[in-house]
Image (spheres, grey):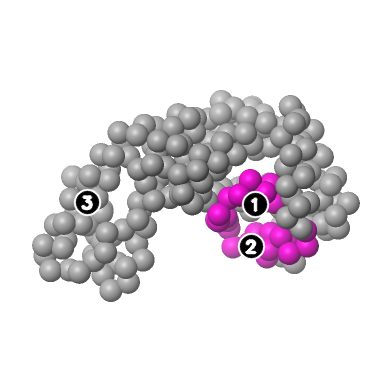
Amino acid sequence: EIFMVQVRAMLKASDGLDNLRIMLPMVTSVIEAEEAQHLIHRAWLEVRDEGLDIAMPQVGVMIEVPAAVYQARALAQRVDFLSIGTNDLTQYLLAVDRNNRQVASLYNSYHPAVLHAILHVVEQGHEEGVPVSVCGEMAGEVGSALLLMAMGVNALSMNASNLLKVKAAVRQVKASFTRQLLNEVLAMDNGEVIAAYVDLQLDKAGLGELLRNRKALV
């Protein structure tokens, strides 16, 4: 009941704009996505019956648990877009609570399992003709943002404070450089080594200032 109230409110708020997109978080199975879509469609019909001429919104899912990674293709066949939540996905893949000081040091978004999981989702989504975006800390960090671009991610969502430095990095490197860097790190098996190697290669490419001042706006 609460979900229906929320969806109806979103639909009514989009009246005259037709720019609503609904993303479903923490999806762990195809049936969850299907059931949510059924409810969204029902809410849309109800709002239409009330006289509001609103377009059916696009519906996507957040890929942020390992179960969704391995169902990426099946989910892509049923939704309009995928978005990878790298913070939670990294946490659940590595069984590390990043907010727990005792184990937070084990949290590493450059871990091979994380990189290969993201690449798998991107490839599965694109094979089904579905755009894949990324939100989370990886999208706003220069090195990982460039790797995500090389994987073919369609859009990056980040804090406003990171926009300018990521944009500056994107403008300074060639696509061939990022693809080669991605291929090299995918062959590595240590997240700490990968992080250090990415920083080294970006420093050689003239992006050292962006790496040394992670919070700087360039």
> Magenta residues?
145-173
Q: Is residue 16 magenta?
A: no
Check contact, mark 2 vs mark 3: CB within 8 A: no
Q: Which residue is mark 2?
A: 163
Asked if residue 24 can be seen in this view, the reply is no
Check contact, mark 2 vs mark 1: CB within 8 A: no
Mark 2 surroundings: few (<14), some (14-19) or many (≥20) residues within 10 A? some
User: Which is more N-terminal, label 1 or label 3?
Assistant: 3
Q: Is residue 44 left or right of residue 128?
A: left
Location of the C terminus by quadrant is bottom right
Residue 38, picture quadrant:
top left
Q: Is residue 27 left or right of residue 204?
A: left
Q: Is residue 157 magenta?
A: yes
Q: Amino acid at mark 2?
A: Leu
Q: CA distance from mark 2 to mark 3?
A: 35 Å
- Residue at 77%, 44% in the rendered image: 181
Q: CA distance from mark 2 to mark 1?
A: 14 Å
Q: Amino acid at mark 1?
A: Met
Label drawn at residue 41: 3
Mark 1 surroundings: few (<14), some (14-19) or many (≥20) residues within 10 A? some
Label drawn at residue 149: 1
Asked if residue 46 can be seen in this view, the reply is yes
Q: Amino acid at mark 3?
A: His
Check contact, mark 3 vs mark 1: CB within 8 A: no
Q: Horizontal and vertical percent for residue 167? A: 68, 63
Residue 183, picture quadrant:
top right
Location of the N terminus by quadrant is top left
Q: Horizontal and vertical percent for residue 141? A: 68, 51
Mark 3 surroundings: few (<14), some (14-19) or many (≥20) residues within 10 A? some
Q: Residue 214, relative to residue 16: is it above or below?
A: above
Residue 190, picture quadrant:
top right
User: Which is more N-terminal, label 1 or label 2?
Assistant: 1
